[in-house]
Amino acid sequence: MSSTGPSVGSGGRTARRAVEFGRTYVVRPKGKHQATVVWLHGLGDNGSSWSQLLESLPLPNIKWICPTAPTQPISIFGGFPSTAWFDVGELSEDAPDDVEGLDASAAHVANLLSTEPDDIKLGVGGFSMGAATALYSATCFSTRKYGNGNQYPCNLSAVVGLSGWLPCSKTLSKKLEVDDAARRAASIPLLLCHGKRDDVVSYKFGEKSSQSLRSNGFQDVTFKSYNALGHYTIPEEMDEVCAWLRSKLGLDGTSS
């Protein structure tokens, strides 16, 4: 699937470029198929590494879809190409958001979920930049629109973000003024996990992201912190993800 995203050339001019998403890895459910979750890797990674970890989790009722981001020039790397869901110049609260890139990746996720059966619950999760894209997808679900105004088609039942942040947080309250957005925001469960020793995406970004979601009407937000955790994942964190998904998606006979 190809789409377009922005790139900043010399003198700060914005040029359009075609981006093509990489290979998608699928982990089939080992038990009854009750939910499908698209899981998004971090900057410079690919879908394969996460598919291997997700396959080992005790969640037999989930089908995991692990796409690979487009390879594109990344501003934080001085324009050097890397697999990335969107362009990022710096990790700061004042950094501009690459809405065009975010929209393209959120649309790719929605497209991957669009062929799932009607009775299957749908979710999005990710790590680092993948977590940011997952949280952005949650806001698109709430407003029923991408940042470009096009309609967002998916009904999401759960969103997970590990070691990430919430893009476009400053404009979120205005976006949620549309009809029924507040009800959808209140209905969707979100799990955010972050390590206090994260030296790539600062812990404060995860904490502030959860606060921003709550203050904008996302009522079912769980934020978990880990004192010794850096910018990676640990079994304790993945145990938390498993328990949360079982509960919120009503897997294995548990009620949501």
Image (cartoon, rainbow, N blue to C red):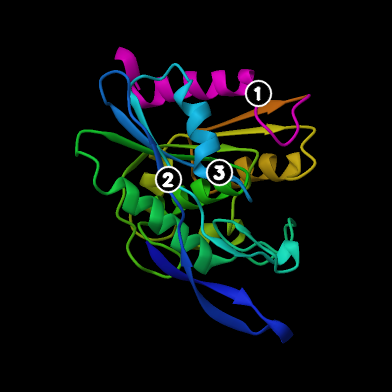
Label 2 to label 1: alpha-carbon separation: 29 Å
Residue that appears at 33% across and 49% down: 112
For this view, does 162 lie left or right of residue 144? right
The answer to whether residue 252 is left or right of residue 79 is left
Give me the C-alpha separation between circle 1 and circle 3: 15 Å
In this orientation, which residue lies closer to the viewer: 256 or 123? Answer: 123
Q: Quadrant of the C terminus?
A: top left
Give the extent of the magenta segment. 228-256
Q: SS at mark 2? A: helix
In the picture as drawn, the residue positioned furthest to the top comes out as 253
The picture places residue 207, in percent across and down from the top left corner, at 68, 39
Residue type, numbered disc 3? His
Between label 2 and label 1, give the one nearer the viewer.
1
Q: Is residue 237 magenta?
A: yes
Q: Marks 3 and 1: in contact by CB < 8 Å? A: no
The residue that label 2 is drawn on is: 185
Q: Number of numbered discs present?
A: 3
Q: Which residue is mark 1?
A: 234
Q: Which mark is residue 162?
A: none
Q: Secondary structure at mark 3?
A: loop
